[in-house]
């Protein structure tokens, strides 16, 4: 075997090495009286000297075993890739022929299916598909239950929209209805009021909004009857601007519901509404 | 369950079973279609069982009595 040579300790240098040891392995330093009285110290000293001895032994062994180990490694590398001479594996420790051996392979023919392999496949796929079916139904039911629980109930939906017949409201009159617990002002404006609301210089107002932004049909003004200051209900057909006046802190709104004077910061809010028919108003 | 698949395989059609399971797309489609049909039939069936169990005690069973009475009151 010709491998790359690495410097290893020879016999002579090994003997030199051992001469460097402070104590031979069997040597135990004498115990002082204090140490004898203290059993922990005695054990510590014992293990120290023992570990020194074992490490010496290991080092010598390693140096002497190295060439053989290298030879084994090289032979392994050389034989790797060659097909094994033996096809079967025999345990070096025991054989299946022994009585009571755990290496015997049991006979499973009792559990073997007598049906065709295709039939067994059909069965297993059928079972998997049935489980998938049940899972799909269960998942759908779970999601549906959550969505039904979170969606608005019938009484909430009934309160969410209000339908008003506008024919009963004469021109120039206010109607206050309750929608979602809040008052809603509906005013049937006259042509003069529409003109007044449109001609106002709205660009310089506190909350600049044109009249067209606030109404869908100019004759119908629909807005929440909640003062934007602190939430009072303004009084209709009052105030300095011919619209609404909040008695709590004196906010004046004009005929388009815009804030003109007083502490309120914003115009009266316009809710979402629509006219599904000519004479019908739906708020919400 | 094994019996069902055996019945499918041996008596209905081995070709049907194998075409059902051979392509994953067909298999999954069959699973979801089956889930839909199963849910429909399960809901209908359980509702029928519930109605027959509570026959005569639900609002839809006793509704005519009270509505007829209310109409008579209105007439009076």
Image (spheres, grey):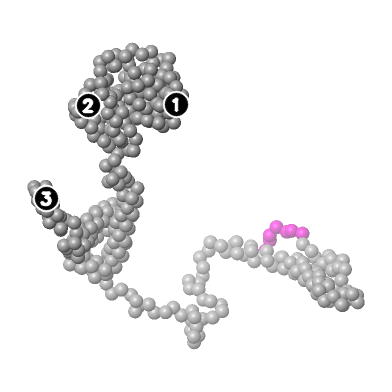
Determine whether, in the image, residue A251 is placed left or right of residue B21.
right
Residue A280 % position (x, y): 21, 30
In which quadrant is the C terminus of chain A drawn?
top left
- Residue range in magenta is A1-7
In which quadrant is the N terminus of chain A drawn?
bottom right
Q: Residues within 10 Å of mark 2 (few under 14, many from 20)?
A: some
Q: Residue at x 27, y 69 (%)?
A: B2
Instruction: Depth check: give the residue in front, A197 or A105.
Output: A197
Q: Is residue A265 above or below residue A95?
A: above
**Is disc 1 placed on a helix, strand or loop?**
loop
Distance in Å between CA atoms under marks 3 and 2: 34 Å
- Mark 3 touches mark 2? (CB < 8 Å): no
Q: Residue at x 24, y 30 (%)?
A: A281
- Residue position marked by numbered label 2 in the rendering: A169
Q: Nearer the viewer, mark 3 or mark 2?
A: 3
A18 drawn magenta: no
Q: Mark on residue A59?
A: none
Instruction: Depth check: give the residue in front, A94 or A244.
Output: A244
**Same chain? Circles 3 and 1:** no
Q: Which chain letter matches label 2?
A: A
Q: Which chain letter matches label 1?
A: A
Distance in Å between CA atoms under marks 3 and 1: 53 Å
Q: Is residue B21 above or below residue A110?
A: above
- Residue position marked by numbered label 1 in the rendering: A249
Distance in Å between CA atoms under marks 2 and 1: 30 Å
Q: Residue at x 32, y 16 (%)?
A: A197
Determine whether, in the image, residue B46 is placed left or right of residue A98.
left
């Amino acid at each position: 075997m010709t491998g790359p040579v690495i410097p290893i300790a020879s016999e002579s240098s090994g003997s030199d090495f051992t001469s460097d040891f402070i104590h031979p392995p069997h040597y135990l330093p004498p115990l002082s009286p204090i140490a004898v009285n203290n059993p922990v110290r005695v054990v510590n000293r014992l293990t120290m000297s023992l570990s020194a001895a074992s490490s010496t032994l290991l080092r010598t062994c390693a140096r002497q075993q190295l060439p053989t180990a290298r030879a084994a490694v090289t032979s392994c590398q050389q034989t790797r890739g060659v097909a094994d001479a033996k096809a079967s594996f025999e345990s070096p420790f025991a054989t299946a022929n022994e009585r009571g051996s755990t290496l015997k392979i049991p006979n499973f023919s009792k559990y073997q299916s007598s049906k065709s392999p295709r039939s067994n496949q059909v069965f297993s796929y059928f079972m998997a598909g049935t489980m998938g079916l049940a899972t799909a139904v269960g998942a759908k039911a779970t999601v549906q239950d959550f969505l039904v629980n979170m969606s608005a109930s019938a009484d909430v939906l009934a309160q969410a929209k209000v339908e008003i017949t506008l024919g009963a409201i004469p021109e120039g009159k206010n109607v206050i209805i309750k929608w979602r617990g809040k008052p809603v002002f509906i005013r049937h404006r006259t042509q003069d009021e529409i003109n007044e609301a449109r001609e106002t210089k709205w660009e310089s107002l506190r909350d600049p909004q044109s009249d067209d932004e606030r109404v869908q049909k100019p004759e119908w003004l629909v807005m929440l009857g909640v003062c934007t200051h602190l939430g009072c209900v303004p009084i209709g057909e009052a105030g300095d601007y011919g619209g609404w006046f909040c008695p709590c802190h004196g906010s004046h709104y004009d005929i388009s519901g815009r804030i003109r004077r007083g502490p309120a910061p914003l115009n009266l809010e316009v809710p979402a509404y629509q006219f599904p028919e000519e004479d019908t108003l739906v708020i919400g | 369950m094994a019996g069902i698949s055996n019945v499918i395989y041996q008596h209905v059609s081995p070709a049907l079973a194998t075409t059902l399971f051979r392509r994953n797309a067909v298999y999954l489609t069959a699973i979801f279609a089956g889930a839909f049909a199963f849910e429909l039939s399960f809901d209908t069936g359980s509702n029928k069982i519930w109605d027959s169990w509570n026959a005569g005690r639900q609002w839809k069973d006793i509704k005519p009595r009270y509505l007829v009475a209310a109409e008579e009151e209105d007439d009076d």
